[in-house]
Image (tube, rainbow, N blue to C red):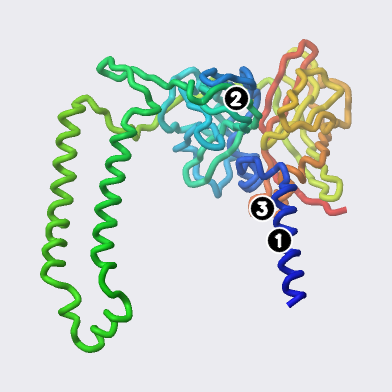
Amino acid sequence: MMKTRKALLGILFLILWGLTFMPNTALAHGEKALEPFIRMRTIQWYDVMWSKDKLNVNDEVVITGKFHVAEDWPRGVPKPDATYLNVSSPGPVFVRTERYLNGQASVSSAALKLGGDYDFKIVLKARLPGRYHLHPFFNLHDAGAVMGPGHWFEVVGDPAAFTNQVKTLDGNVIDMETYGLANGIGWHAFWFALGAAWLLWWVRRPLFIPRYKMLQSGQEKWLITSLDRKIATVILLGVPLFVLGANAMTDRQYPNAIPLQAGMDQIEPAPSAVNGGLIQIKVQRTEYRVPARSLTIVAQIYNASDQPVQVGEFATANVRFINPSVGQPAPSDAEVVARQGLSVDSADPIQPRETRTLRITATDVLWRNEWLDGLIRDADSRLGGLLFLYDATGKRHIASISTAVIPKFD
């Protein structure tokens, strides 16, 4: 008995300890849940920014950024013929008021083109006070959500002060927070009451064992009475007639209602900022050293621009590996960045019209912390990402790369 009590106390202590010291990763939104090859080789996000991170209720925040749809799309992932750009949040703490893809207003799902470049803009209105972690993300049909970079937002103010008014097609102004609320509650209450009454009608009489005994003794005809049949007939005929009548009344009351749209936006890619032709990269070999958490890419780079260029950054799955020896805009504290995680075997710039083979090494514990080292155990052990090169004037050249990864365990 004493041993049992000690065991129960030990289990209770572990549960309380786990709840008290829960790791911060539990606050995330599943951005690490998908296999690494999907996160690396589908939607490649970059230049994601937020207009502000401290808001009052009713304030708006604008999220902007760009993404490249990888050319080397994984074979095991359905093509991006049906996608939806959204923002993940812990409940309805913001209201999305506007959304644009390549400057075009977009309210429906969209078909993306492999190798295409897109910019996006999302406008959110703060609804509930609190501190929230938000990500832009793409829902890929039959594949899941590919998360973009996340950021913390703090909302203050009175939740009762929130307003969400819109003008309808006939010119009326309605409050989206309360419009139709009583009607919805009434319909739910009606159907719940009808269903509960039907169940209680049968539950009120003896169940299970008594009815089983009646079946065994050949008295099944007494299980359902003539009154049961009459009530069932009334429900069978009355419910469809009631629904059709309510639908007809609704059509007369709201003659200009528009059904939910099921169309697909066809948005053309923007002029290519990635793989634009001035920098041509051919990856020859890629190795990942497991003990060192280090990725080495051997690539042949041809500089077709008129300025010398240097490799300044490698980005994959929202992780940025920075070459500190190359001048570039400083990353924000909100990003997942290895600030000194990138090195190149040659510090000399690649001259115009020069072809050079470089060893580019990205080393940091983020490979493990962001669950990207699981790539070597994927059925598709290929890596994708964006390589950023800078010239002396600060101009940036972007190239999307994809390559098979060879694991090294020494």
Q: Nearer the viewer, mark 1 or mark 2?
A: 1
Tell me the CA gap for discs 3 and 2. Answer: 40 Å
Q: Amino acid at mark 2?
A: Val
Residue displayed at 18% across by 38% down = 247
Residue 245 x, y percent position in the rendering? 14, 41
- CA–CA distance between discs 3 and 1? 37 Å
Q: Which residue is mark 1?
A: 12
Whether residues under marks 3 and 2 lie with C-beta atoms below 8 angstroms apart, the answer is no
Q: Is residue 244 left or right of residue 29?
A: left
State the residue position of label 3.
378
Query: Is there CB contact under 8 Å for labels 3 and 1?
Result: no
Residue 226 left/right relative to 289? left
Look at discs 3 and 1 and give the one toward the viewer: 1
Amino acid identity at mark 3: Asp
Give coordinates of residue 188: x percent, y percent: 31, 44
Q: Mark 3: few, some, or many residues within 10 Å (few <14, many ≥20)?
A: few
Q: Residue at x 32, y 77 (%)?
A: 208
Secondary element under disc 2, as helix, strand or loop, is: strand
**Residue 69 showing in the rendered view:** yes
**Which of the two residues, 15 or 132, is positioned nearer the viewer here?**
15
Q: Earlier in the sequence, mark 3 or mark 1?
A: 1
Under mark 1, the amino acid is: Leu
Q: Farthest residue in the top direction?
A: 393
Q: Report x, y in % for residue 352.
A: 78, 17
Instruction: Identify the disc placed on residue 155.
Output: 2
Q: CB of mark 1 within 8 Å of CB of mark 2?
A: no
Q: Residues within 10 Å of mark 2 (few under 14, many from 20)?
A: many
Choose mark 3 or mark 2, whichever is in front.
2
Marking on residue 127: none
